[in-house]
Image (cartoon, helix red, strand yellow):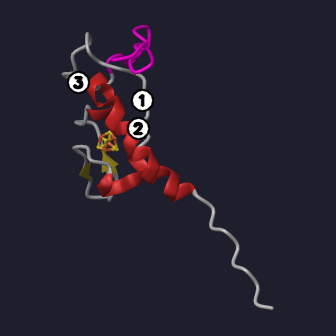
Amino acid sequence: MANYDFFQHRECEYFPCHSGADPETFSCLFCYCPLYCLGENCGGSYRYTEEGIKDCSHCLRPHLRKNYASICEKMEEVLKLTKKSAPKAEKP
Ligand code: SF4
């Protein structure tokens, strides 16, 4: 446990923004989950709506301090999504 792995913004109008979440343990550090872009590979408890939208309203994974390290470990996969491909070398 460190000082940087947990943060609360209790004055936020939505705190805690998931219904049923414990306000004492709710972390706002990953307010918007950085793993959303991983789709079905985020490791959380999402569902997809009939319209095909990923719905994370029942997932507390990014809001629990104990998950800080595992969220950071998944960032490697997020970085791969955003990596620019190296230009292909031209043939002589
Ligand atoms: S909030 Fe949960 S379900 Fe949604 S992307 Fe993050 S880990 Fe996955």
Q: Which residue is mark 2?
A: 72
Which one is in front in this view, the residue at disc 3 or the one at disc 1? 1
Residue 8 is one of the magenta-drawn residues: yes
Q: Is residue 49 magenta?
A: no
Find numbered disc 1 in the image and state the secondary structure of the residue it sits on: loop
The quadrant of the picture showing ligand 1 is: top left
Give the residue pinned by disc 1: 30
Local crowd at mark 2 within 10 Å, few (<14), some, or many (≥20)?
few
Image vertical order of residue 30 relative to residue 76, above or below: above
Q: Which region is colored magenta?
A: 1-16
Q: Which mark identifies residue 19?
A: 3
Residue behind label 1 places its C-beta within 8 angstroms of ligand 1: yes
Q: What main secondary structure does the magenta stretch of the protein show?
A: loop
Q: Give the mark toward the camera: 3 or 2.
A: 2
Image quadrant occupied by the C terminus:
bottom right
Residue 18 in the image: state x and y as whole percent.
28, 26
Task: Point out the tag, 2 or 1, that comes first from the N-terminus.
Answer: 1
